[in-house]
Image (cartoon, rainbow, N blue to C red):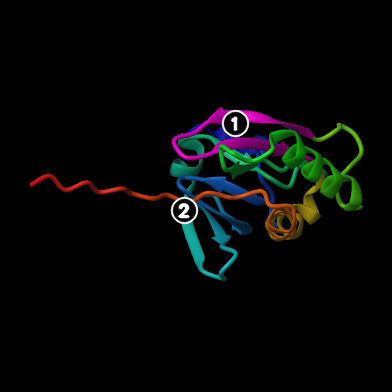
Amino acid sequence: MDWTTLIDRPARVGDYIEAAGTAGTVSEITVFSTTLVTPDRRTITVPNSKVLDGPLVNYTTSETRRLDLVIGIAYDADVPAAKAILARLCAEDERVLPEPVPQIGVLRLGASSVDIALRPWVASKHYWPLHFDLHERIKREFDANGIGIPFPQLDVHLDR
């Protein structure tokens, strides 16, 4: 075990971290283990040797985070109109930070959709509420504007 890392304290009680294949809020740190409480209130105790053996992501240390969404639209949909709707939804939501400006662009041409990346910045405390609200508002706005969101389909051809 690397004791200097433990002394450096990459996480403190109350921090939300991801380590050793699990994520949660740190409730206790001892010499031998770190106890996390997951969002669904499970308590997980992880040996510090496992915590220190791999990457530790601490979501609490920064006041802001970038929200990364990928929104798939139909190939026959109007890409500039979809991007304009996404930009408007970000501009209308006070939780979206004005700087850095949200990134909006075609991420990839998928098997059944044109995937648009939407990357606004948000205060860490608003990350999940904005995540959920934006998805719902995007669905409603795309429906209202005739922008289709495809879903996987399988065509089966039978030969005799």
| Count of number-bearing discs | 2
- Foreground pick, 138 / 95: 138
Mark 2 highlights which residue? 46
Q: Residue at x 45, y 42 (%)?
A: 49
- Foreground pick, 47 / 144: 144
Q: Residue at x 57, y 71 (%)?
A: 41
Q: Amino acid at mark 2?
A: Val
Bin the neighbour count of mark 2 within 10 Å (Cα to Cα): few under 14, some 14-19, many 20 and up: some
Badge nearest the viewer, 2 or 1 = 2
Bin the neighbour count of mark 1 within 10 Å (Cα to Cα): few under 14, some 14-19, many 20 and up: few
Q: Is 4 situated above or below 91? A: above
Classify residue 77 as left or right of residue 121.
Answer: left
Q: Which mark is residue 4?
A: 1
Q: Amino acid at mark 1?
A: Thr
Q: Residue at x 45, y 47 (%)?
A: 21
Q: Is 42 situated above or below 133? A: below
Place residue 99 in its image quadrant: top right
Looking at the rendering, the stretch of residues picked out in magenta corresponds to: 103-120
The CA span between labels 2 and 1 is 18 Å
